[in-house]
Structures are given as C-alpha cells and as structure tokens.
Image (cartoon, helix red, strand yellow):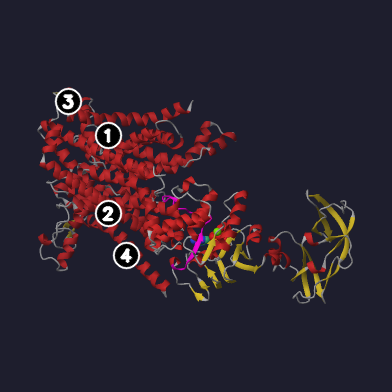
Amino acid sequence: MTNISLRNLTKVYEGTKEPAVENFNLEIEPGELVAFLGPSGCGKTTTLKMIAGLHSVTGGDVLFNGERVNDIKPENREVVMVYQNYLLFPYMNIAENVGFGLKMRHVPKDEIARRVDEILKLVKLEGYGPRKPNQMSGGQKQRVALARALIIRPKILLLDEPLSNLDAHLRDEMRELILTIHKEFDVTTVFVTHDQEEAVLLADRIALIFEGKLQQFSRSEDFYERPASKRIADFFGNANYIAGEKKDNKVATALGTFAVREDLKVPDGRVTLIIRPESIELGKNGENSFETKIARRIYMGTYIRYRIDMDGAFWDVVGDPHYNVDYDEDKTAGFTLPKNKIWLLEGDK
Amino acid sequence: MTNRARVSLLLAPSLIILCVLFFGGFLLGIMQSLNYMPMIGLDSPNFEAYKMMFTDEQFFQSLLLTLWISIVTTVLVIVLSIVSALALRNTFVGKRLVNFLYQFPITVPYVVITIGTLFLFSQSGSVARIAYNMGIISDQSMFPELVNDKFGLGIIFVYVWKQVPFIGVIVLSILQSMGNNFEELARSLGANKWQSFRHVLLPIIIPGILPASIITFAYTFGSYEVPFLLGRPYPAVLSILAYRLYDNVDLNARPEAMAMAVFMTAFLVVLVFLYKKLLNKASGRD
Amino acid sequence: MENVKQNNSRNALLFIIGLGIIIGVIVPIVPQLVWAVSHRWAFPDLLPEAMSGRAWKYIANPNSKVLSATLNSLVIAICVTVISILVGVPAGKALGMYKFKAKGAIELIILSPSIIPPLAVTMGMQVIFIRMGLSDTIFGVILVHLIPTIPYMTVSMAGVFANYDPAYEEQARSLGAGTVKTFFLITLPTIFPGIVTGAMFAFLISWGQYILTIIIGGGRVITLPLLLFSFASSGDFTLTSALSIIFLLPSIIILVITSKYLSGQSSGMGGFGNI
Ligand SMILES: Nc1ncnc2c1ncn2[C@@H]1O[C@H](COP(=O)(O)OP(=O)(O)OP(=O)(O)O)[C@@H](O)[C@H]1O
Ligand SMILES: [Mg+2]
C-alpha cells in the first residue's frame, strides 16, 4: 500500500500569474480514502493531475512512500486517473477499453481477455464487452471507466468527480461501488467532489481547498466541530457567530458571558464564538443560557427553524422535531449554548 | 410554406445549375466517348474509343504515373499534416508567425507555387546555383532532375506544399476539440508517448481527415495545371493526355479523350464508393 | 533532470518543425520576387547581374494584354463569386438547418464536382456551348467556373448554418422584430463572417482557374492565368515572375482578412483543396 505526501506543492500554469495550486502540504495514509473538496476552479483537478504526473509541478514535491516521483513519467507511476466524463475511447468496444492498460503493458491477449471478463463481472457489466461506448448509459460508462483503471491494479486511484454526472439514484449505487472497490483492492484513493455531503459520506478524511490553498485536512466531524475558519464553518452547513472577548475560559459577548471548554487552544483576547444551529438547546438549562426575541418561526416539515435576534444579527436555531416545545414569533424565549459545542476562532473579523 | 417546399426552393437554384452544367457535361462526355452525338455528325455509336484507350500503351503509363503522384502526395500530406499539427499545438516563441505562414499556402494559387518550384528546383534554379557555388556540383547537368522529371517529384512537391496546411488545419481543430484529456488518460493507464499517439490520437485523427484527404486525392488525380508546367511530355498524367487528345487537330481523337475523362470519373466514383463501404463496415461493427 | 532533458529535446524538435514551416513556405516564393526585377540572371549567379523594371513597364503599358487580362479575371471572379453566394447561401441553409428525405443524395450531387475533375465534364460540354454561342465568351467562362465554386460555397455555408441556432431568430420574433428586421439584425450578422470567408475562397477558386477557361474561352477570353502560362512556357522568367506577383496579391489580402477564421471546424474546408 502506498502513502502519498505532497510537500509545498505548487502549480502555476503557463501564461497565468495566479497559482492554480499553492504550497500544498498533505500526508495521505496507505489505503486511505480521501476527498478533495472545494468549489469549482479551486485546483482539485490540477492537484490530482500532479499526483498522476500528467501535469508537471511548478514547485514542491510529490512523494509515494517517501520516494520523490516528480520526474517519473505518468505511465510508470502506477497511478490511474478516472475522469469525470468517463472518456471511453469511442472507437474501441468496452472490452478493448477495459483492456487498454494491459495492452500497453504487452500482456498476452488471452490473459487480457480473462482479466477483462473478471473485472467486468466485478463492476456488474458481465457480457457487455462487445458493446461500443455509445451504447452504454452514463452509470455504465462510469463503471467501465472504473474497471479500465482497476484492471492494471494501480497503487493509487484518482477519481475526478466520479459522481457528479450521475443522477441521484445512480449516485447511491456508485458510492457503494467505490466503497466496495476501495475495500477489495485496498488501494489508496483520492476522489474529487464539490459536494460536501458526498465527501462526508465517503471519505476517511477530507482535504478542503479554496483558491488553490489547502484550508483544512481532517475527519469530517472536525469540519463541523472544529472548523479552522468562518468560511470553512459556512462551507459545512450553517453556523452562527458572535464576536466576544475571551478571558479565563469565558467569552464576554453583547448577549452575555458564555463559558467555554478549557481545552480550546485559543489565546485570550478578541475571538469569534461559533455554534451550529442544531447544537443550541431550547429553554434555559443553567449555564450559558439567555433570552431573546424570536424574529421568525419557519416551518420546515420535519422540524421548526427559528431565527433569533442576537443583538442586531440573526442566528438560526433548529427546533424540536417532536414539537414538544414551540415558540411563537415576536415572543421572547430562552436558549442554551452547551459548553462543549462552542468553538472559538481567534479574532473577530 | 411547408418545410418541404422551403427546402426545395432553397436548393433549386444550386441543384439546377449543377445538374445542367455538371451532369449535362458528364452525359455529353459519355455520349461523345461512345461516338454518338448527331449534332456534330457523330451518329454511329461504338466502343472504339474505349478499345483504343485500353490498348494504348501510353494510357497505362499515364495511369501509372497519375496514381503514383496522387498516392505519394496523399500519403506525404497525411504524415506531414499530422506532424506539423502536433507541433503547432504547443506554445512557443513566434507561434503567431509560424501559424500565419502555415496557412499561407492555402490561399496561394497553384500557378504561383508551380512557377516558384520551377525557379527553385530546375537545373538552372536557385538550389542548383547554390550547389554550384558551394562546389557540390561543377556543372548544371550534374544537378539531379527535380522538375520535369520521370517521377513527378516537382509535381508532388507542389501538391504537398499546397495540401499540407489544408489537412493540417483540420487535424489542428480535431486536436483542439479533443483536448489533452484522452492522451493524459492513456498515459495514466500506462501508455507511453508513442503508444498514446498510436492507439489514441491516430484512431481519432485519421477518420476525421479521410474525407478531406479523398477530396485532395481526387484533385491531385484530375488536375491539369501543375503537371502541365512541371511534368514531362511523356509519360504525362491522365488529364494532360486527355486534353492533348481533345485539343488534337484530328477531331477523330476526341472520342478517346472523352473516354479517358469518363474513365477518370468512373475511377474516382468507385474510389469514393469503396471508401463509403469501408466506412459503413467500420461503423457497422457496433 | 529528466524533465529538463525532455523539454530540451521537445524544444529542439519544435524549433526544427517551426523553422521547416517558415523556410518551406517562404523560400519557394522568393526566386519569383527577385526574378521580377532582374535584368539578366544567368546560371550560376546567385544574384542577378542587373536590375530592371522592364516587366513592370510592360505590365503598365496599356497596349500589353496584362491590364485587360486582369480586368477579365476580376470581372469573371467577381461575377462567379456573386452568383455562388446567391445560390450557395440558400442551398447551404437547406443542408445545414433542415432534415429532409434524400438529403444524403443531394449532398452527394453537390459534392460530386469536388471529386470528379471539372476538366472531365467541361470537355464534353464544349460542343453545346459552341452551339449556344457561349463558347469564347466571358459569360460561358463564368458558367463553367461555377462548377467548382457552387459546391464549395454550398458546403461551407452548410457548415455555417449547422452551427447557427435558429432559437435566436425565434427569440427576436417573439420580442417583436418582423421578418425583415430579424434577417438584418439577427440572421445576417451571425452568418456574415461565414459568407465573407466562403466568398473569398470562391473568388480564389475562380481567380486561379486555367484549364476550364481555356476549354470554354477557347483562348479568346484571356485571363491572368492564361497569360501566366503562356509567359512561363515561353521562358520569359522576368515577365512571368512579375505577373505571378500580381496574381498573388488577392491571395495575400484574403489570407490576412480570413486567417483568424481559418479553422478545420468549418466543413467548408472541404473546398480549399480546389483553389
Ligand atoms: N491547462 C490550464 N492552463 C491554464 N490554467 C488552467 C489549466 N487548467 C486549469 N487551469 C486553471 O487552474 C485553476 C484550477 O483548475 P482546476 O481544473 O484544477 O479546478 P477544479 O478544482 O478541478 O475545478 P472544477 O470543479 O471546475 O473541475 C482554474 O482557475 C483554472 O482556470
Ligand atoms: Mg476539475
């Protein structure tokens, strides 16, 4: 199994000034399933292509198991990239497409045939070998592309937006397939997505990228509970903020003083307090509770969402799914911020 | 107005002119080749012209030369156009100039480059002069015959010069619309540079340029101007031979000229037909 | 470093091919430029012994045939171009924008002149042209030049219309533009570059025509290519070159105008082989 290290990886495309990828540092464990998550144009594909050796690096290093591979040609890296739009070779049938990598390695014909059949079975496309790509549906094409990549038993599998061209139903199926494959082949896998839900569902760890810079690389829980910035907090669901002054594990804000965990490594001074709408408790339950006006009550079907007035700003609060507690608009109500759900960021910008 | 009526109206002028002139002319050619055209006193239809043509040693020599020139030209054009297009896909200093010059031959009339070739490659041409002054040859006649030569080298040069950018521009646009992804994918699946060219690029380029290559082949096969200035009187290419017979003071030679024109037409039609069949067969594999 | 080495050999190859293109394109044109102003240029001199404006004086002389031949060539090529536009644009629209029965057959008919040498059909036609009094006339020559230009114009316009989205027209109509306004404000501006490019190449096809002009013009309708051929065969290199340069002028102008539109994407490239 292969570990991937990216050290200060930088890419500036010819004829552009802004780096597409800037100073990337990342350690991917052997056999890990990692998601590159970020908005369009943030450099996800570029990073994948540098790992695959398809694009040269402008600066920094790519290492596999500690060995620098910057100068190893893509065909010798044993890293396969699967493209978003499948890119099945149109003039080859499915079997020829899947067997392509073996043919390039001069594997004997009968062995290619055998292994193609084997892998087509794995992706549930038994018997589709003689078909042409234009006779396949989107989901089938995606599976062919996967089979074509897996047949050469790569050390590293790179999937560029493997799910975004599929409709919702197929997406579930493909997710399962990716998990199965990842388990079965034990291959270090990186996949790209701009859908945080997808990243959370699939990945062991997520690398969040904005504008060519790595923002945070961690398990998905950490993105919810310990975001590194307001922007990250916003990217992963909703977040409420309030500025305050931290001193001795207490944060003084316009709406009162809130106690926070002792293990937060934020120095005393100006801070931003963050809490998720679903973490706020209804009612005054001792410590960290306060009262404020309900500005809006929004019926969401399975629950009620409140918008509460926080000294001019508005916070979202997810209400009780069982409707045991129900506040009216324009009334004052009590809320509590559980101490262990509060997260702090340095500064108040 | 129904679509049908509109389409007919749009197509009519074009089709009428072409049918009258082109197919009319073709029909008249066939009639004259069969020695039948009462209007000019030919009224005893026969196959004499074809018999004469197919027993004429000169005809076969011309056919051979014509085929040689068209085939060599087409192969060279395909190879050079792909190589040059692959190079032009890269960015480099001076690319704008090279790009502009690359397209230049497309608009240059055949006559101009034909004359240029004559001045450049004849035994008293610029290249021969340079060779003499460099001491490579000591006499004009030592310079190899590159124009008006046995193998039609000068003729081939002109056709290649004109046609490479024409096909090359098509290759470039195929490469452009294809992007780099297919090649990259092939590389990541383990193909080296050559393999990804051979197994991925080429199978996409070739079908894309075949129709245009057939048109240039046909043009090379039937055109008159270039071999007229750069060819030998004997053996001459088919079009020259045909026109010579046609232009003969002896009007009795005309049916054979027409027979030759009909032969050239039939040959090219069969070629296109075979190409279509091949195409259908290739795509019928689905 | 592997990468650097690779880049070096790649750059060397690019350099060779780029230089090859520059030399290969320019050098065959150069001797004509020198010949055109040379007096005597015997073997093995690399440069002419003396310069001379003889050819240009001859060309400028109103009694020489050059002026009238140029005029003939221009009149013929312009007429051919206009007619080709008039019949080729509608036909291209039909082929590019509509689906109909027998489309394949009609495309075949329209394309066939680019496969079958026009020489082959023109020889058969000439007897009829004589009967109809069209032989040896400019009008007759214009007619035969249409054989290669109409297919070219039609096919290249079909390419333009195939990329043309009629939804724009519909949008304009729904916003209240009438048929005429829609045509001038929407349709024409969209297809105009395509028409111009196609027209210029139709012009060049006619401009460069020799054998069709000879067969139907019977040597009485003198155009520039006819003069060029006769000078070239007579061995007057100075005059030939000067004429050749004049003959090349429209090509250069047209290349400068159209070079940015030249891309294989237009199916009209199919006709370029005929110029
Ligand atoms: N070949 C190239 N030349 C120049 N710039 C490029 C090239 N490829 C990508 N870029 C630029 O680099 C940046 C990152 O592109 P990249 O394709 O890596 O984004 P991405 O995160 O994969 O986006 P998407 O989700 O849209 O696929 C973009 O600003 C893009 O415009
Ligand atoms: Mg991408």
Q: Picture quarter containing residue B199?
A: bottom left
> What residue is disc 1 on?
C144
State which mark lies toward you, 3 or 4. Answer: 3
State which mark lies toward you, 3 or 1. Answer: 3
Label 3 vs label 1: CA separation?
23 Å
Label 1 vs label 2: CA separation?
31 Å
Which residue shows up at 82% across the image and 59% down it? A312
Instruction: Report the chain holding disc 4.
Output: C
Q: Is residue C31 left or right of residue A324?
A: left
> What residue is disc 2 on?
B76
State which mark lies toward you, 2 or 4. Answer: 2
Label 3 vs label 4: CA separation?
58 Å
Q: At label 2, which amino acid type do we have?
A: Leu
> What residue is disc 3 on?
B36
Q: At label 3, which amino acid type do we have?
A: Tyr
The image shows residue B136 at horizontal and vertical percentages of 15, 67
Disc 3 to disc 1: CB gap under 8 Å: no
Secondary structure at badge 2 equals: helix
Which residue shows up at 43% across the image and 30% down it? B7
Instruction: Report the chain holding disc 3.
Output: B
Q: Are marks 3 and 4 on the same chain?
A: no
> What residue is disc 4 on?
C16
Q: Nearer the viewer, residue C50 or B140?
A: B140
Q: Are marks 2 and 4 on the same chain?
A: no
Disc 1 to disc 2: CB gap under 8 Å: no
Label 2 vs label 4: CA separation?
18 Å
Secondary structure at badge 3 equals: strand
Residue range (magenta): A76-93
Q: Nearer the viewer, residue A132 or A216?
A: A132
Secondary structure at badge 1 equals: helix
Q: What crowding class fits label 1: few (fewer than 14 Cα within 10 Å), some (14-19), or many (20 or more)?
A: many
Q: Nearer the viewer, residue B143 or B184?
A: B184
